[in-house]
Amino acid sequence: MTCEYSVQGHAISDLAARFGTPLYVYDGDILREVYGSLRERLHPGMDIFYSVKANPNISICAVLRSLGAGLEVSSLAELETARRAGAAPGNIVFLGPGKSAEELDACLQLGVHAIVCESLDELAALDARQQPVRVLLRVNPSFTTKGARLSMGGTPQQFGIDQDVLFQSGQFIEELRHVTVAGIHAYMGTRLLSSSDIVHNTRGILEVAGKLSVELDFELRTVDIGGGLGVPYFDNETDLDLDALAEGLNDTVDDFRTRHPGCRLITELGRYLTGWCGMYVIRARYVKQSMGEWFVVADGGTNHHMAAVGIGSFVKRNFPVRSLTRYEEPAVQRYNIAGPLCAPGDVVAKQVSLPEIRPGDLLGVERSGAYGPTASPGLFLSHGYPAEVLVLDGVAHLVRRRDTVADLLGKQQLISL
């Protein structure tokens, strides 16, 4: 007897019939569980901010905000998302290496907790507005990142200001008339799965923050240590040990707060908070064999889930892929899972072991709650973006309708010929 996958009592076939495929399904129970498990372990003096870029769906943001998360944003739309999701301005930080004048002005008007400045020119641009503003200096530290799958600090970067440059910028900062430096931000890398590496990076950031506050003569009111906690997608990767992380991190926080009792500490997390809760659901259209390999051609692919291709990796590795129609049946065949695009790279998974797949079956790419539609070329071949559904307290909510042909063509203008 075939047993299909379900979410909070909703059979996946029912969700697919109601909302169509391709489809992103988010499990609100898992979203709450992940946040709560981390919150109960972390030092109470460490605030958790959600990096909206990981999944900017306004309902996802609203759930995390309701649990106590602040929001970290990087565009006008994300700033408005945070506002509509109910975030107080004091729980919003705005960062990004190339902020526009409009974005800076919007932050000033709303009164966000801090603008994270990533260049000396940005500090000058803010000061020229002649309005009081609190900023964090994004520092690119000199020490080496440990454990990051993608390093974003300690090497030449478009992000932040090199530590050595900041140490030589005391006079420049002292001459600012309207900008108050309130602290430091650093983000060392992403997809960290070792608790000891995260603790190492955090200690380094806090040490740099302390030195800069002395050298540049400002009071540390906020330090944002970044985050980068990882989700294990691939074979031979293991879950982050939260207990070990909390033990090392909380000791570090205790020591820092003893020396800086009034300083607000922030960790910003995106992938870790939402990655676990999402499933990308696609339907098999055709199953065929080509030169000895089996292919499933589905109705969705890399146009909605570019992260599954392994961007930034030299070797293609598979996200966890499951048959949702035959969820508990044993694997009998290896399949390549392809999408509908006219592109050879539109392969979501290669040689993945699954039960026998038949046209009409539903497949799921697990751990897909982060960097799904938001990091994918949804306009390629004009398929548009998929629907998104959040199952919360047993109720399935459509939280983003899928694009229609009218949506895709509505912004275009046909010239007269």
Image (cartoon, rainbow, N blue to C red):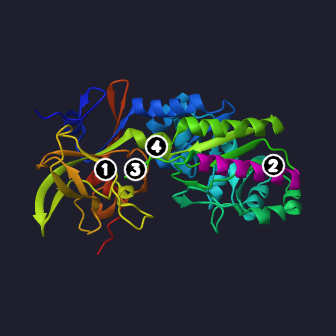
Q: Is 212 contained in the magenta span? A: yes
Location of mark 2 (residue): 210
Residue type marked 1 = Asp
- Disc 3 to disc 2, how far (Cα)? 36 Å
Instruction: Classify mark 1: helix, strand or loop.
Output: loop
Identify the residue shown where x is 64% and y is 66%: 155
Q: In whole angstroms, how far apart are the C-alphas of marks 2 and 1?
A: 49 Å
Q: CA distance from mark 1 to mark 4?
A: 35 Å
Closer to the chain start, of discs 1 and 4, is 4
The N terminus - image quarter = top left
Give the side of residue 65 with respect to residue 286, left or right: right
Q: In the rendering, at what x and y percent does residue 254 appear? A: 74, 35
What x and y, as percent, mark residue 8? 31, 27
On residue 403, which mark appears?
1
Horizontal arrangement in the rendering, residue 259 relative to residue 254 (left or right): right
Give the alpha-carbon distance from disc 4 to disc 3, as whole Å: 9 Å
How many neighbours does mark 1 have within 10 angstroms: few (below 14), some (14-19), or many (20 or more)? some
Query: Given this view, does label 1 or label 4 mark the residue nearer the observer?
Result: 4
> Residue 277: image x %, image y %?
40, 38
Magenta stretch encompasses residue 349: no
Q: Which residue is mark 4?
A: 239
* Marks 3/1: CA–CA distance: 28 Å
Q: Residues within 10 Å of mark 4 (few under 14, many from 20)?
A: few
Neighbor class of circle 3 (other Cα within 10 Å; few <14, some 14-19, many 20+) is many
Q: Earlier in the sequence, mark 2 or mark 1?
A: 2
* Left or right of 155, for residue 164: right
